[in-house]
Amino acid sequence: MAGEVAPDASTLRPTQDQRGLSKSQAAYQWVKARIADGSYSPGYRLVLGQIAKELGVSVVPVREAIRMLEAEGMVTFERNIGAQVAMIDPREYEITMQTLSLVEGAATAMAAPLISVDALRRAREINDEMADTLAHFDPASFTRLNLEFHSVLFEACPNPHILDLVHRGWNRLRALRESTFSFVPGRARESVAEHSALLDLITGGADALQIELSARNHRLATLDAFLAQQAQANAPAQKGADQ
């Protein structure tokens, strides 16, 4: 998955069309173009100082540009997180996560008795890597490890149709956002703990239903955290509209 990699240097200078604009308007168009072409994907953290340096301007016009993009719904700003490219279609994300919780839960339960000892050891190693990232949290890296962890658990599913639905769900998530953990970073620590509990169930030979519900609830807990964050973010706007 893509991390926070700066665009090619050849794209940093304002175009001919931008030269007649104010600095804030030029910065607005520059950032907006990179959101549109996917260089800045959903969840990408917009570091104002870095953008200002790339454009050769102060932070002030970049901040104004971000505010314009926030007003258009293309950027979100959260205290202690900063500015980020907004999630694409939160409702579609919700539906995808609900569906994935069902099919991935089933796939994990069916795969459990078929997962090798070496694969389970690898899953614990991956989860340990995820725990190590918490001190210096990088949502993109955490998400990459998260998929790797779950792949170990569901790829042994003997039902190819269910496995295909799981793959489709994960592919859909990649199209909808860079990383849910960009929006709810506090969820990452809970996720690592839930991974450990799920592995304990599998290695301990728990029954299929218990494993399925654990995997399903793990996925839904991430969705619930995201929905709670969205509700909190939208509360001030709703309060203002009601006044």
Image (cartoon, grey):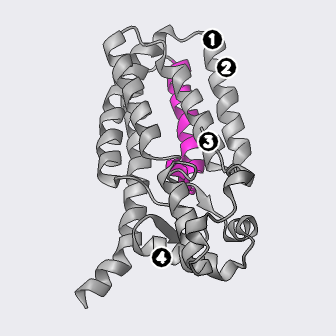
Could you tell whether 213 is left or right of 152 in the image?
left
Residue at 36% x, 41% y: name it: 97
Query: Does residue 226 show up?
Result: yes
Which kind of residue does numbered mark 2 sit on? Arg
Residue at 70% x, 68% y: name it: 55
Note whether 171 is above or below 156 in the view shown: below
Q: Quadrant of the C terminus?
A: bottom left
Q: Which mark is residue 95?
A: none
Residue 228 in the image, given as x and y percentages of width and height: 39, 62
Residue 186 in the image, given as x and y percentages of width and height: 56, 57
Could you tell whether 110 is left or right of 120 in the image?
left
Magenta stretch: residue 195 in it?
Answer: yes
Which residue occupies the foreground of this view, 206 or 68? 68
Which kind of residue does numbered mark 1 sit on? Val
Real-space Cα separation, disc 4 to disc 3, in angstroms: 25 Å
Which kind of residue does numbered mark 4 sit on? Met
- SS state under label 4: helix
Tally of marks: 4
Q: Would you say the residues marked 4 and 3 are in contact, meaning their CB atoms lie under 8 Å apart?
A: no
Residue range in magenta is 179-204
Note whether 5 is above or below 118 in the view shown: below
Note whether 44 is above or below 24 in the view shown: above
Real-space Cα separation, disc 2 to disc 4, in angstroms: 48 Å
Q: For marks 2 and 4, give the one nearer the viewer.
A: 4
Note whether 17 is above or below 63 in the view shown: above
Residue 192 in the image, given as x and y percentages of width and height: 59, 41
Residue 125 quadrant: top right
